[in-house]
Amino acid sequence: MTVRIELLLVLIPLHVLLTSAQSPDAVYLQALKDNWQNTPPNWVGSDPCEDKWDGITCTDSRVTSITLSSINLIGELSGDIAQLTELQTLDLSYNKGLTGSLTPDIGSLRKLSTLIMVGCGFNGPLPETLGSLAQLGLLSLNSNGFSGPIPASIGNLTKLYWLDLADNKLSGPIPVSDGTSPGLDLLVNTKHFHFGKNNLSGEIPAQLFSSEMTLKHVLFEDNQFSGTIPSTLGLVQTLEVLRLDRNSLSGNVPSNIKNLTLINQLFLANNKLNGTMPDLTGMTILNYLDMSNNSFEESKFPEWLSSLQSLTTLIMEDTKLQGEVPVDFFNIPQIQTVVLRNNQLNGTLDFGAAYSDHLQLFDMTKNMITAFTQRSRYTTDLILIDNPICTESGPTASYCHPPTESNSSYSTPPNNCIPSMTCISGQVLSPNCKCSYPYSGTLSFRAPSFSDLGNSTIYTSLQSSMMVSFESNQLPVDSVSLSQPTKNSNDYLVVTLNVFPSGDERFNRSGILRIGFVLSNQTYKPPHPFGPYFFLGNNYDFFSDASKGKHKSVSVGLIVGVSMGACVLVILLVIAGLYAFRQKGKAERAIKKNSPFASWDPDKGIGGCPQLKGARSFTFEELKTCTNNFAATSNIGSGGYGMVFRGSLPDGQLVAIKRAQQGSNQGSLEFKTEIELLSRVHHKNVVSLVGFCFDAGEQMLVYEYIVNGTLKDSLSGRSGIKLDWMRRLKIILGAAKGLQYLHDLADPPIIHRDVKTTNILLDERLNAKVADFGLSKPLGDTVQTHVTTQVKGTMGYMDPEYYMTQQLTEKSDVYSFGIVMLELITARKPIENGKYIVRVVEEAMDKEKDYYNLREVLDPIIGLSTELKGLERFVNVALRCVEETGNRRPKMSEVVKEIENVMELAGINPNAESASTSESYEGKSKGKDHPYLNDSLFAVSGDHLFSNLESK
Ligand SMILES: *[C@@H]1O[C@H](CO)[C@@H](O)[C@H](O)[C@H]1NC(C)=O
Ligand SMILES: *[C@@H]1O[C@H](CO)[C@@H](O)[C@H](O)[C@H]1NC(C)=O
């Protein structure tokens, strides 16, 4: 490198001599370029202004703007930047490869009004010279690795509107002025102090705030501030969002905080605040209030809370609230989320008559609630775990269990078109159903005013406002999609953004640079409920000239070659050789990435090729062909992992293809482990793996296709198959044998973890087949009898013991199987209208009576007119399966025996092969050859012809 810098020094006069008419900034840009890799390929020619270099804007042959976001620049920002003295805008965002410290020379850019370096890899201290940038209006240095104190000199930037230093490693106190040196209290025109996620410490200076200030957003969350909240804060009447959470603040909350009547979002959680809880009456437009985990004095549920009529979200965990929740509180019209965990609230929860339709979550875990009034239109996730209502009556009611994993799996839907295509690797289907290479990244909203992440209207408004912004900036954007909204540990709402190109299937550089700037510069403003945001863009890897783009310094090379003779050429050749070598390495890595099987080569030492017993490897093309290009008509289901397609192999075999969604793929090692496991499972009551595809960046599992769908569909009548008592017994016996096989005979033993009626499939002979090992875990070595895991499974079927101890044993499957048995005879969902199936059966049950008095709750379709021999015995087994502790539940082998006994009681030979197909049930049920022709249990009535079967 030193050789090249020296060359450059020799070159400078040469350039000036040769082309005296070029921009005086050319040499300095050239010098910046020489410190960077991956500069745009059109950065050739000697005049950036004349030659219109991407990302460079000039006025009168002077460089006035440099915007270079998301193009994978690698290198440092050299002091040469200081020579571009007409520069007004500098945006280097989203280039993680830009490292090193921010050069103090930057202070020479006296005309700079916008300095943005979001999401780069810069580090070291912030130079005091930032305070010399007198024109600066927007300073965004968030999401880097900057350390050290906030320079006091920033206080000199009287035009500063936006100051974002969040998500760095800044430390020390917030500087305030003292007559001789400046401080941030002088920033009376600044609207945004975004300092969250740093290591700032000390007291928040009282001097920082005054009635002169015009701040809208004060975001100090997740730092180490201590001491009290200064009462001067109450003077900043313009405040709209205040986040002081996740610090070590103590003392009383100043009472004048309630003068801040423009506040929408207030976060004081996770501090050591004490004294009485502040009265916030008058904050009438407050949407989001979080005061959790402080040391406030014990108090009644404050009455003023019910007066906050704009609240969407109230979080008050562990705040020593006592007494009853007043019924008024439920009248707040927009309330979505209420979390009051860990308080001493007691009595009856009275939802009143007018409770809000928007209420999504009411979490009262660990309180003293003894009852609640149930509303008929009740759809809220009410959680009363660890309240007397649950601890005394037993943990069976749905509100005594954690809710199903919150399913805010929003994703922008297709825009009046049919997404029938499958895109080639790297491309993504846009909402307008076109495949292209999107620009992607994450939008993080630091203080949204809502908490119902599942409301699609909200995202639609975000999406359309973004399109309006892109269109008004004349950007080449076809559409945008939003997906995977989640709350992160700092309560930011994080949403994945894809921006799709219009016209072409990929963006060019100038398109990416302009889109990146609209987002980094806050040109785009989201609608109200979203609040302050920042965007982190990914590198865009899909430029059509991507490979050419990496060649650099060609023109320099030529000039040097001509002017300085052959010996220089030799040096350049060496550099070129090194470069080519590196490129080769890159190419090899790229190939490896596209074909992860390569890494299964035994030589490479991660365990060799998968040990597959009878499972085939399919190419992507093969599966594409057999599903008619993954046509929508072949799609037979979907889930969190992706979609399931029906396909027909060349030999005519029907298969179900489970295709992992782009992005939800597991690592190659996990995938290998999974297919090895699945391929070892062979039993007639377990769905078997035909093969897999691990090609073109795809992960797919190919299973045998089971024609008659799920047991659940049959129980609900959706499949058109009528299930009488005999068939139900046959099906449940098959399912039990499948599970017994997994527990006792599979090697290694497998715990299913998600036994439910939708995971039991029925083949053409109504043989049950246990399916979906998505959650299965082998037990590993034989000594181990349980595995400790993150709790997974489906609400209603989940073993409460597993839930509480997180120790998974085969008895957890037995519990779920017991629920399936009860579902089989009642055709009720495990949790229906807030009632748990186990409770329903137990409450109706009277062992003294005929059929244990269960006629009322049995599925009428079983055929109550006929005798249900063995029903009582069946119920006994089911209830043993759902015993509270695992060791009181039978093993699956015992369940199998018991069901066989029931079948014998019912006069059915459990070992008879089920010879008939469902077709023959349909067409020939009265024919001679039917094996159960004479079985009265079979022919309940004449109307059980399976007319819908054909259409399946
Ligand atoms: C609820 O708690 C309050 C305050 O601790 C107490 O005065 C009241 O008697 C309790 N009410 C019930 C129904 O237990
Ligand atoms: C979703 O959000 C919109 C806009 O804020 C609101 O009007 C609508 O009522 C919400 N829907 C639900 C179900 O809460």
Image (cartoon, grey):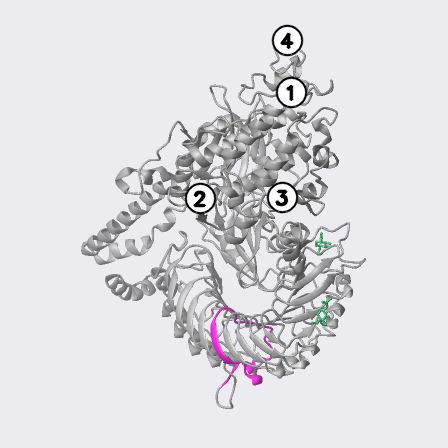
First in sequence: mark 1 or mark 4? 4
Q: Residue furthest front?
A: 848
Q: Is mark 2 within 8 Å of ligand 2?
A: no
Which of label 3 and label 2 is nearer to you? 2
Residue at mark 4: 928
Image quarter where ligand 2 lies: bottom right
First in sequence: mark 2 or mark 4? 2
Q: Which residues are magenta?
A: 182-207
The reply to whether dot 2 and dot 4 touch (C-beta < 8 Å) is no
Q: Observer-nearest residue: 82 or 700? A: 700
Say what amino acid the circle numbered 4 marks. Lys
Q: Observer-nearest residue: 561 or 493? A: 493
Residue drawn at x 71%, y 50% is 379
Q: Secondary structure at mark 1?
A: helix
Say what amino acid the circle numbered 1 marks. Glu
Residue drawn at x 72%, y 24% is 866
In the displayed structure, does residue 447 sit left or right of residue 302?
Answer: left
Which of label 1 and label 4 is nearer to you? 4
Residue at mark 1: 950
Q: CA distance from mark 1 to mark 4?
A: 22 Å
Residue at mark 2: 666
Q: CA distance from mark 2 to mark 4?
A: 53 Å
First in sequence: mark 1 or mark 2? 2
Quarter of image, res 242: bottom right
Q: Secondary structure at mark 2?
A: loop
